[in-house]
């Protein structure tokens, strides 16, 4: 009984205990960051910005090996199970992009920074806001490139639970309205971004100008070239198609932005290696180069990519699998002109169809644009200081003609004790070895262990570089019929080893070819062909087309003992067996289809043409 | 022992139990027909041009696609009901995205879909010469808005011969083509077809406003 009384009194006394420290009970959670904390701490804001920068969209950029094999000048030579990349058609939804989740994140951030930021100073706040707006403009640019005029949503859309979703359903803007939005935004923020001007990985004034230069050029070319088509691609509401009379205005805007970057001493065309070919490779491979305006950076142990693992030359790989995935096409190699200004066609046979005999295996590529060396690894060159071993087989002289013979094993010796097939192939119909006779050099890191999966590569991805700005300026100036247009191209060509003023009369074809060779594998080709409205002609699905079909060039060593041609080389043009279907770009691919679920949710959206 | 056998039987019976409620019967009705202009089938590139088929009455919509075969026929298997057939753009005929054809399907429906091609080819004939194939045909303009972009003769080794799949394609010089008058186009038989028993030939015309050709029906030509 007594014990019970004690128990009860102890128990009851617990209820009379109180505390007068309210703050002890109101503690900040350890696992949640509140909006007030986030938007008042520059470090946290930077980390959220890092997340958004990381999500900057691209179609097949940022070291996307598989994607590049579908729309750049290369084929897939990697694992057989992905050979579908050599055997596919651009579907109606190819390149579809509708990331309004990201747009919402950015709008939300812009609203919250206004609402919650009290303790960070105004300049810094404006810088963060401008970076967010830059990223949003980039997303809208990606949307308009692939889908045409899209709904312009610049505020959070919040459902009011009234049962009526119509306020959330935003109709599509006209295509030119989206480009105008991008321009206005960039004009407003470019001076606010000046504090970042020393950074190459955060948006700054010049990044904004670079995006302006590119986006306005796209708008201008659509205004011009869409309307030159026999049947322009348009919708009645203007969601697709830009009126032709806007072209000059857009070209002027693009040219002004390009000029502002070029005239600034901050950026210089990278020209620090006397070897022009190696210089072109270093330009993207060496971080911090004065050429790059804006890049996505990588760092071993923090953020890596596997582009070197995927694409390094077979015999030089440091890993036991992978390598050699992208095999650049002969058509790309041929698009690099000779330094004397003649067309870059490879002369492997004479007019009668007989082989041209070359003393050295690399002689067939002699005197070509130095950018070829910087872009492609071809026979007779080296990578990482190691000579590559590219040779398809031997050409044995028998009964008045050459018999081409290929070894079953890479690196084997032929009966004359000379090399039969090189360690780097090319081998037709084989995986993890070049199928075209070419390997990729551009963007493939030569750092130690970069081609291993354990370490991987940390070279950066160029979103914008000065070389592109020169080309943008040349194209815009040419379209505006300004006489100095060719100077921009000639400056770029001097860096590639051409003499001064190598081009006297500029043409559209020259500009287009320059873009193809200068910007290969930088996620430009597909969009360039689209905006010039020639994609359906270049990739016409025909088996006889040089561009729609990836071809290769196989070197063979001559075996003809006692003859002067013995141990010299001949080159055979081939169509790789693994490349199954000619690329075929239909009118419907100029703008991707909008997902039916999106259309169902928003009856105000109109469909893209042909979908 | 007896218990464990019972146990095994119980487990097995659970495994073999099916459920009759989670499956629909597969669709068994068919909708088929031809794409026609004035009653004649329209030849197209294989796996290229299509019809969209929609059904109303559901909250959300999703179409499905009927691909048109090289000879202009199409065929789909579906459930009984009322459907809307839409002619998709990107075809050798006039785009009519808002003009639907309502089709009632019960067991079997055969519906020919009329289209207006930009151009048609008629009265085509093929002759075998020594190492060449010569085609004679007449091109008619149907829609005033279009001009001829290309006229081509295709030779192939399979019945699926068109702009993308062919062994040989020859383009006509456009100045030699007059609308409504007979034109001639010849092609050499390519080396890899010379020894064959037969080849396939057809002629296509493409208008400036479309990326697809209008093709004649494929013709098998004996080489022996």
Image (cartoon, rainbow, N blue to C red):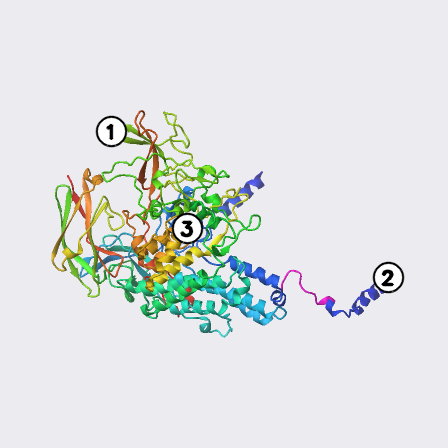
Q: Is residue A383 visible?
A: yes
- Residue A3 got which mark? 2
Q: Locate the C terminus of chain A and report the quarter of the image it occupies.
A: bottom left
- Residue to which mark 1 is pinned: A400
Residue A570, image x and y in percent? Answer: 32, 35
Q: Chain of mark 3?
A: A
Q: Is B118 on the left-hand or right-hand side of A333?
A: left
Judge the density around disc 3: few (<14), some (14-19), many (≥20) Cα neighbours within 10 Å.
many
- Residue A409 got which mark? none
Q: How many marks?
A: 3
Q: Is A589 on the left-hand or right-hand side of B148?
A: right
Which residue is more in the foreground, A500 or A308?
Answer: A500
Q: Is A220 on the left-hand or right-hand side of B115?
A: right
- Label pair 1/2, CB-CB below 8 angstroms: no
Judge the density around disc 2: few (<14), some (14-19), many (≥20) Cα neighbours within 10 Å.
few
Which residue is more in the foreground, A556 or B176?
Answer: A556
Q: Is residue B28 visible?
A: no
Q: Which range is magenta?
A: A24-33
x 53%, y 51%: residue: A298
Q: Look at the picture and state if A5 lies above or below A577.
A: below
Q: Is B169 on the left-hand or right-hand side of A584?
A: left
Which residue is more in the foreground, A49 or A586?
Answer: A49
- Residue to which mark 3 is pinned: A495
Q: Chain of mark 1?
A: A
């Amino acid at each position: 009984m007594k014990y019970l009384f004690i128990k009860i009194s102890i128990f009851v006394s617990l209820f009379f205990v109180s505390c007068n420290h309210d703050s002890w009970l109101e503690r900040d959670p350890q696992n949640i960051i509140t909006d007030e904390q986030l938007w008042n701490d520059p470090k946290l804001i930077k980390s959220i910005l890092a997340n958004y920068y990381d999500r900057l969209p691209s179609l097949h950029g940022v070291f996307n090996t598989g994607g590049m094999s579908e729309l750049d000048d290369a084929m897939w030579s990697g694992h057989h199970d992905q050979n579908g990349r050599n055997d596919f058609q651009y579907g109606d939804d190819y390149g579809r992009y509708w990331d309004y989740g990201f747009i919402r994140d950015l709008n939300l951030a812009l609203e919250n920074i206004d609402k919650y930021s009290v303790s960070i100073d105004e300049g810094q706040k404006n810088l963060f806001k401008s970076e967010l707006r830059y990223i949003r403009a980039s997303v809208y640019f990606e949307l308009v490139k692939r889908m045409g005029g899209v709904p312009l949503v610049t505020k959070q859309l919040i459902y009011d639970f009234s049962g009526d979703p119509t306020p959330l359903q935003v109709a599509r803007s006209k295509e030119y309205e989206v480009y105008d939005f991008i321009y206005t935004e960039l004009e407003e923020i470019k001076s606010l971004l000046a504090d970042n001007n020393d950074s190459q990985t955060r948006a700054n004034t010049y990044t904004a100008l670079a995006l302006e230069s590119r986006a306005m050029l796209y708008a201008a070319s659509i205004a011009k070239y869409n309307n030159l088509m026999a049947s322009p691609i348009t919708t009645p509401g203007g969601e697709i198609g830009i009126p032709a009379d806007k072209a000059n205005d857009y070209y002027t805007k693009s040219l002004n932005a390009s000029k502002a970057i070029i005239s600034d001493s901050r950026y210089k065309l990278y020209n620090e290696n006397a070897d022009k070919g190696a210089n072109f490779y270093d330009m993207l491979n060496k971080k911090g180069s004065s050429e790059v305006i804006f890049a996505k950076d990588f760092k071993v142990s923090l953020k890596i990519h596997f582009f070197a693992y995927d694409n390094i030359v077979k015999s030089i790989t440091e890993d036991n699998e992978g390598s050699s995935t992208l095999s650049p096409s002969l058509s790309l190699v041929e698009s690099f002109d000779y330094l004397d200004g003649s067309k870059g066609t490879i002369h492997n046979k004479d007019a009668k169809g007989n082989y041209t005999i070359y003393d050295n295996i690399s002689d067939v590529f002699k005197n070509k644009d130095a950018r070829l060396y910087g872009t492609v690894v071809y026979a007779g060159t080296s990578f990482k200081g190691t000579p590559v071993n590219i040779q398809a087989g031997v050409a044995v002289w028998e009964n008045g003609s050459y018999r081409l013979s290929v070894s079953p094993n890479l690196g084997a010796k032929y009966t004359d004790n000379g090399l039969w097939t090189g360690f780097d192939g090319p081998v037709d119909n084989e995986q993890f070895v070049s199928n075209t006779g070419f390997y990729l050099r551009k963007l493939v890191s030569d750092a130690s262990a970069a081609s291993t999966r354990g370490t991987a590569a940390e070279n950066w991805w160029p979103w914008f570089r000065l070389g592109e700005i020169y080309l943008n300026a040349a194209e815009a100036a040419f379209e505006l019929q300004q006489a100095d247009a060719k100077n921009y191209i000639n400056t770029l060509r001097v860096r590639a080893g051409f003499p001064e003023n190598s081009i006297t009369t500029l043409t559209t074809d020259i500009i287009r070819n320059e873009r193809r060779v200068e910007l290969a594998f930088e996620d430009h080709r597909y969009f360039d062909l689209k905006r010039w409205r020639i994609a359906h002609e270049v990739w016409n699905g025909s088996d006889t087309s040089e561009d729609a079909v990836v071809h290769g060039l196989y070197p063979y060593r001559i075996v003809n003992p006692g003859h002067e041609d013995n141990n010299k080389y001949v080159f055979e043009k081939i169509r790789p067996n693994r490349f199954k279907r000619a690329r075929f770009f239909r009118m419907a691919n100029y703008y991707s289809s909008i997902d039916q679920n999106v259309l169902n949710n928003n009856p105000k959206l109109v469909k893209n043409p042909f979908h | 022992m007896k218990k464990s056998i019972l146990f095994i039987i119980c487990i097995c019976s659970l495994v073999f139990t099916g459920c009759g409620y989670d499956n629909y019967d597969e669709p068994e009705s068919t909708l088929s027909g031809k794409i026609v202009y004035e009653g004649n089938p329209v030849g197209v590139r294989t796996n290229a041009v299509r019809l969209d088929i929609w059904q109303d009455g559901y909250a959300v919509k999703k179409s499905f696609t009927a691909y048109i075969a090289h000879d202009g026929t199409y065929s789909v298997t579906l459930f009984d009901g009322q459907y809307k057939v839409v002619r998709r753009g990107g075809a050798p005929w006039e785009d009519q995205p808002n003009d639907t054809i309502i089709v009632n399907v019960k067991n079997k429906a055969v519906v020919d879909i009329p289209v207006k091609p930009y151009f048609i080819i008629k009265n085509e004939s093929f002759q075998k010469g020594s190492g060449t194939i010569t085609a004679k045909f007449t091109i008619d303009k149907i829609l005033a808005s279009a001009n001829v972009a290309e006229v081509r003769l295709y030779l192939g080794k399979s019945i699926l011969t068109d702009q993308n799949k062919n062994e040989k394609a020859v383009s006509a010089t456009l100045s030699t083509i007059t609308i409504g008058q007979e034109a001639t186009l010849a092609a050499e038989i390519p080396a890899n077809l010379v020894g064959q028993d037969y080849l396939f030939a057809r002629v296509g015309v493409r208008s400036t406003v479309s990326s697809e050709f209008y093709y004649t029906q494929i013709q098998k030509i004996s080489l022996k």
